[in-house]
Image (cartoon, helix red, strand yellow):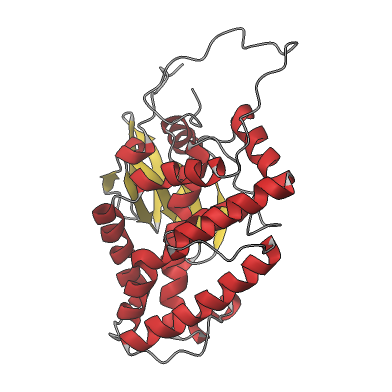
Amino acid sequence: MLPPLKPIAMKERVSMVFIEKGQIDVKDGAFVVIDETGIRTHIPVGSIACIMLEPGTRVSHHAAALAARAGTLLVWVGEAGVRLYASGQPGGARADRLLYQAKLALDDAARLKVVRKMYEIRFGEKPPERRSVEQLRGIEGSRVKKLYELLAKQAGVEWKGRNYDHTQWDNSDTANRCISSATACLYGISEAAVLAAGYAPAIGFIHTGKPLSFVYDIADLFKFDEIIPHAFKIAAKNYRDPEREVRLMCRDIFRQTKILKKIIPTIEEVLAAGELEIPQPTEESIGPAIPNSESIGDVGHRS
């Protein structure tokens, strides 16, 4: 039996790495990628928020188990990091956090307060008073549309709107492909942070009905700070492989802005705006027979 690991806190990790065309396994206790020639590349799995697995990648059971124990999210994505197919779950919703999140989402007044806080963080100003969630969603959509147009104009990129078909990726214009690659990177680390904080990716406040609704809510709070403006700039330069340039850009921006130190506190801030208390265990509830050991990781990481 392997000794228990103590996951590193999300804020101390490297954001992500991309892996393609290799066998991921555990050799001599190390998480490695083995290419077709047999060369091993060591991956410091415990210090990475999420590993994006592109086509041509195979993962052994041992490697998947080690990533889960280290609290590292594995995300299976399409070529160039676009289109998410599946993801592992290194942490997950703690009962108290899950009930708190669900309580906020089901209370109309609390949900509106959370959405208003998200709007304030995203646009740097309070939203109009006496507006419903649906009305705020419409206002947000209109502002985002204009923001896309402005950023495209500033970068000198022809913009026909946010529109692409993931089944015909090569037929999409360069700007949309760059934006999709950038947002895929942001969604990956946002999902890792949501899970590490102990919340459920599916219970959203602005976005609903999707497996990653809350991930989209949180990612949108950071999307236009650096990521989308730089994606447009890359689209304007006619790179041979713009998606790769976007991935490198995201890696550098995530490091420079220290985004992993910001995401979980932002999650707590927007949920606190709902002004509801975290539910306490009922009197008849039974605690764990074996108490959870202390960890240096986040509350959502499994012990």
Residue 241 % position (x, y): 33, 77
Image point (51%, 54%), residue name: 218
Residue 26 % position (x, y): 38, 35
How many numbered tags mark residues here? 0
For the residue pair 58 and 83, the one nearer the viewer reads as 83
For the residue pair 279 and 204, the one nearer the viewer reads as 279
Q: Examine the rendered structure and indicate whether residue 219 appears above or below residue 290.
A: below
For the residue pair 71 and 29, the one nearer the viewer reads as 71
Residue 279 % position (x, y): 66, 27
The answer to whether residue 55 shows anywhere in this view is: no
> Seen from this angle, which residue lies furthest front?
129
Q: Is residue 197 left or right of residue 34?
A: right
Image point (35%, 74%), residue name: 229
> Seen from this angle, which residue lies furthest top?
289
Image point (34%, 40%), residue name: 11
Image point (65%, 22%), residue name: 280
Residue 296 % position (x, y): 36, 24
The answer to whether residue 36 shows anywhere in this view is: yes
Identify the image quadrant of residue 186. Answer: bottom left
Q: Examine the rendered structure and indicate whether residue 72 appears above or below residue 111.
A: above
